[in-house]
Image (cartoon, rainbow, N blue to C red):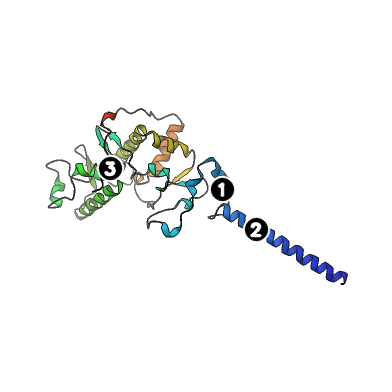
Amino acid sequence: MTKTKFLFIVFTFTALLISCTDSNSNQAGKDLNPNSNTDNSWQVAYPAHWWKPVPREQAKNWEILPQDAGFMEVVLSKRNELGILSNFSESSFVFHGVCYPTVEAFWQMMKYPETENDPRWTWAKNWKYTRRQVSQLNGYAAKSAGNYANFLMDKNDANWVTFEGKVIPFATKEPQEHYQLIWDVLIEKIRQNPEVLKTLIATKDLKLIPDHGISDKAPREWHYNLLWMDIRKLIQENQLNLETQEDLSLKTCKGLNK
């Protein structure tokens, strides 16, 4: 074998070895974070299952999956304990002396006739639910009841709801009374449910991502993830009183699925 031929073989073998090493290294990086080329080592400060991949074929048609989060982000997935921050989670709370099993029940209840002379009674011959019934529903049932009310609201060109007899604009560009009500309800939810508080604090400084799409043009109270980050910041800065003034003996409701 000539010296030239020998050197050619050595060079070729070395090149192949380097190529394989680079390939393995690149693959390791992809396995570390299948969604990007960045290092996900920051996730070690949190429960690993918060980002546990879910097969795409198992996803709901509305669902943003845990693995879809970006750098320093976490999806508030209903597939793990972060789902307790959802408006659908059955973390009952008392608000103005009434027990609600879910934030969603409170939200959708306001769309239903409240008083005997409420003009909304004329919108339908028979409303699907009473206001009281909606206030006691679980998240999904309340959402369904709300969709029925949405149809009647659209049909009657009504962009308002009521609470304690007061007419309140429903979807406003800038935060108004409806936003404040939802904010106050979330505050009571976290005051009255230690697990909700514990879970929110555990997210530290992560950006919270909703587990479903929300239009950027939607009112701020629709973006529950943003409200939770605002609340979390107040807690971190010791600017939020976590003591409720509500009567917790009334906290006995459970979400109904009707």
The residue closer to the viewer here, 241 or 103, is: 103
Foreground pick, 108 / 2: 2
Q: Secondary structure at mark 1?
A: loop
Q: Inspect this view and state whether residue 37 appears.
A: no
Categorize mark 3 by other alpha carbons within 10 Å: few (<14), some (14-19), many (20+): many
Which residue was labeled with disc 1?
Answer: 40
- Reading the chain from its start, which is encountered first: label 2 or label 1? 2
Q: Is residue 109 visible?
A: yes
Tell me the distance, in whole angstroms, between the alpha carbons under discs 3 and 1: 38 Å
Q: CA distance from mark 2 to mark 3?
A: 51 Å
Q: Position of residue 161 (x, y in %)?
A: 23, 44
Which callout, 3 or 1, points at the residue further toward the start of the chain?
Answer: 1
- Quadrant in which residue 9 is drawn: bottom right
- Label 2 close to label 1 by CB (< 8 Å): no
Q: Is residue 251 left or right of residue 9?
A: left
Identify the mark at residue 255; answer none if there is no mark.
3
Specify which label sits upstream in the sequence, 2 or 3: 2
Q: What number is the disc on residue 26?
A: none
Dot 2 corresponds to which residue?
24
Q: Is residue 198 left or right of residue 8?
A: left
Q: Residue at x 17, y 41 (%)?
A: 114
Q: Mark 3 against mark 1, which lies toward the viewer?
A: 3
Residue at 15%, 51% in the rendered image: 123
Give the image location of residue 54, x and y in percent: 46, 54
